[in-house]
Image (cartoon, rainbow, N blue to C red):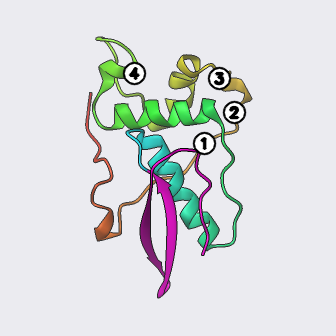
Amino acid sequence: MKQIKARKNAKHILLPSVRCSSALLVYAKLTDNPADELVALLNANRTAHKSSSLADNPGLACIALQYIKAYQGDCEAVGGSDAKKPPDSEFAQTFAPYCGVDASTLSPITGRFLDANPNMSSLPKRSQC
C-alpha cells in the first residue's frame, strides 16, 4: 500500500482508487485547498505507476490553486474585479507573480486533465469569467 506523506497533525481519510483491476488505498489530507486534493490525486496515480511523487513546492502549489479558482469561475479571488481567466497556455505567466515565482524559471507546463472516471464527478467544471 502506498501512502502520501501528510503534515503532522493533519486530518486524513482513506480514498480507494481502482486502476487496472487493482485497488490502491491512498491517504489524502482533508483541507479546503483544492491544490492539495489535486496533488494527492496526481501522486496516487504516479505512485500506482511506479513514478516518484511530486515534490512539495509552495510556489507551484499557489499557481495551481490560483488556476483552480479561476477555472471554477472565481476570477475576482485571483485578480480583482477586472480579472479574466487567462488562456490555458498563459496561466503560469499570469499567476506566477502573485505566488512569488519568476515565470521565466518555469519549464513549460503542458497537458490536460480529463474527467473520465464517473467517481470523480466532483472535479471542477470549466466556467468562464
What residue is shown with label 2? 106
Question: What amino acid is labelled 4 in the image?
Answer: Val
Residue drawn at 70 percent across, 25 percent down: 104
Callout 1 touching callout 4 (CB < 8 Å) = no
User: Any magenta on residue 123?
Assistant: no
Of pointers 4 and 2, the one earlier in the residue sequence: 4
Say above or below: 53 vs 97. below
Q: Which residues are magenta?
A: 1-29
Residue 13 percent location from the top left of the image:
42, 60
Q: Which residue is mark 4?
A: 78
Q: Position of residue 83 (x, y in %)?
A: 34, 17
In the rendered image, which quarter is residue 78 located in?
A: top left
Q: Are marks 2 and 3 in contact (CB under 8 Å)?
A: yes
List the residue tagged with mark 1. 109
Query: Local crowd at mark 1 within 10 Å, few (<14), some, or many (≥20)?
Result: few
Residue 101's label in the rendered image is: 3
In the rendered image, the residue lying farthest to the front is 9
